[in-house]
């Protein structure tokens, strides 16, 4: 052994090291410690070598390293190794001024496969996807699994032209999308499974943006691809980022607004044929100190997406019930009904009936003066549960109105089964009457059907012939009504 001979000859003294031996015909890792023996005259008289087979330890170390940097299911690089390679790619890009591309993709509706076929089938799909991804890329490209059904592809050396780099990256992204759209055989039976993917893509050149920012940009583009209907490729743009940041800022302001009581209820009058005030609809408004009056079209969808609609809806319900109590103590307003819009997410809470009951009892509001307005999206989701819940509320005395009637497709199917008191004709059928004969015919049909079913009808957006007299009368009547949370306001249509 050269190491032992060198130690005995005194050229290196004590020797310690590790090396691979193939003397046995197999590759074996060996650790050696060599110490020479010297005479009184410092002459080498011999030595001792301790040799240890460390192959198993080396294999364990390699397994630990592999687990630290590779995904155990697909054997692809994991996030840690990707970030390391991306950092090196940015340094190289900064040196040669060549563009690279980073794309994030995930599988559309992957959760449905896991839920219906089981996680073992889902794992087979993830492995098959990783194999197709690797086959679609150059050897120098990196494909990593970030977890779940999310993958990241990093490409380098796309040239110094941004336009050319974008074209190349888009071609690869479409190639990947096509490959992943081909059928898969996942089970023992020869049944084909089809899956699609959404891809978000961003370019990089130099070290202007750190790896975390590039991943965020690609993720924003992925969000846009999903918003476009999935199975699509989208590039990141600064406008996308601005939109996402604006949405995040609005969400933060919305949460803060709920905590600080920045919301108000406005009351839109509802009248009968003679112009007599019979009730009102509660419309929520957000008066932000920084943004001013924020349109419900902006914050209601955001509240739905984030789940804040539950807190917001509960506040509306409590405030509306308190308003009913104020009105019923006023001789001029005691017969008024107050309509409150209820979101699908709010209505389908398991304790929604109890929430309504508590609001009524805590405020002392008369239940028959509360009218809950439900849209078809509420009604058509789990119809049997909806009917049961509506009957429970009906037993309390609460009334129901089906909002935006005529705009859906299945209202007539369930109309006779629901414990409704009223249907509201959507203003899209009303605003052009009497000029539009088709709209007039639709409204007449709805009125005739409602009469047969014993339902009251209310129309949105009605424009009375003598609008000035009409609205001045409404405002005069409402001025005698004390509003609890903000102002009473007469408005045309519904906002």
Image: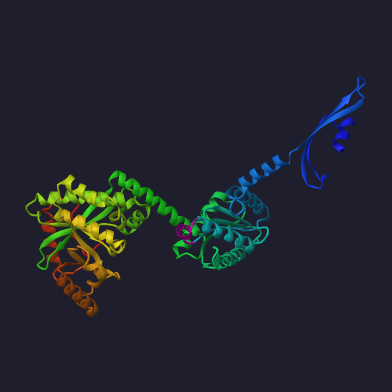
Magenta highlight range: 108-118
Image-quadrant location for residue 13: top right
* 117 in the magenta segment: yes
Direction front: furthest residue: 188
Q: In front: 168, or 383? A: 383
Q: Could you tell me which residue is drawn at 25 percent across and 54 percent down?
A: 284
Question: Could you tell me if residue 415 is visible in this image?
Answer: yes
Q: Could you tell me which residue is drawn at 68 percent across and 55 percent down?
A: 96
Image-quadrant location for residue 158: bottom right
Q: Is residue 84 left or right of residue 116?
A: right
Q: Could you tell me which residue is drawn at 11 percent across and 51 percent down?
A: 328
Q: Is residue 154 left or right of residue 494?
A: right
Q: In front: 122, or 86? A: 122
Q: Is residue 102 above or below residue 412?
A: above
Q: Is residue 149 left or right of residue 335?
A: right
x then y, percent, for residue 306: 37, 52
């Amino acid at each position: 052994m050269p190491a032992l001979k060198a130690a005995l000859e005194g050229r290196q003294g004590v020797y310690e090291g590790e090396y691979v031996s193939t003397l046995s015909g197999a590759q074996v890792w060996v650790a050696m410690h060599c110490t020479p023996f010297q005479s009184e005259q410092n002459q080498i008289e011999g030595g001792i070598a301790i040799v240890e087979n460390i192959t198993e330890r080396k294999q364990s170390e390699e397994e630990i390293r592999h687990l630290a940097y590779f995904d155990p299911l697909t054997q692809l690089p994991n996030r840690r190794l990707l970030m390391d390679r991306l950092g090196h790619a940015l340094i190289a890009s900064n040196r040669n001024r060549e563009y690279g591309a980073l794309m994030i993709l995930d599988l559309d509706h992957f959760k449905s496969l896991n839920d219906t076929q089981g996680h073992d089938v889902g794992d087979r799909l993830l492995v098959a996807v990783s194999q197709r991804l690797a086959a679609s890329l150059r050897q120098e490209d990196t494909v990593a699994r970030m977890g779940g059904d999310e993958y990241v592809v990093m490409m380098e050396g796309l040239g110094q032209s941004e336009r050319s780099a974008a074209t190349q990256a888009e071609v690869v992204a479409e190639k990947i999308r096509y490959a992943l759209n081909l059928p898969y055989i996942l089970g023992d039976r020869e049944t084909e499974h089809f899956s699609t993917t959404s891809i978000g893509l961003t370019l990089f050149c130099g070290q202007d943006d750190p790896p975390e920012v590039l991943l965020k940009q690609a993720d924003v583009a992925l969000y846009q691809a999903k918003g476009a209907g999935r199975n699509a490729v989208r590039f990141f743009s600064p406008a996308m980022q601005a939109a996402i940041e604006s949405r995040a800022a609005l969400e933060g302001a919305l949460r803060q607004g709920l905590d600080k009581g920045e919301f108000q209820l406005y009351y839109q009058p509802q009248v009968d044929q003679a112009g007599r005030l019979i009730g009102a609809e509660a419309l929520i408004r957000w008066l932000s100190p920084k943004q001013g009056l924020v349109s419900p079209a902006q914050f209601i969808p955001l509240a739905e997406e984030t789940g804040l609609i539950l807190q917001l809806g509960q506040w509306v319900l409590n405030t509306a019930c308190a308003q009913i109590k104020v009105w019923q103590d006023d001789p001029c307003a005691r017969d008024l009904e107050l309509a409150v819009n209820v979101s699908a997410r709010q209505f389908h809470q398991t304790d929604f009936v109890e929430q309504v009951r508590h609001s009524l009892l805590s405020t002392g509001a008369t239940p028959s003066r509360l009218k809950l307005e439900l849209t078809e999206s509420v009604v058509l989701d789990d119809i049997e549960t909806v009917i049961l819940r509506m009957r429970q509320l009906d037993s309390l005395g609460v009334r129901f109105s089906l909002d935006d009637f005529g705009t859906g497709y299945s209202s007539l199917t369930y109309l006779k089964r629901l414990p409704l008191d009223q249907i509201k004709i959507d203003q899209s059928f009303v605003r052009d009457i009497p000029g539009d004969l088709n709209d007039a015919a639709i409204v007449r049909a709805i009125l005739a059907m409602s009469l047969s079913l014993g339902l009251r009808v209310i129309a949105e957006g009605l424009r009375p012939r003598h609008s000035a007299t009409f609205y001045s009368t409404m405002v005069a009547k409402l001025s005698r009504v004390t509003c609890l949370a903000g102002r009473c306001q007469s408005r045309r249509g519904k906002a």
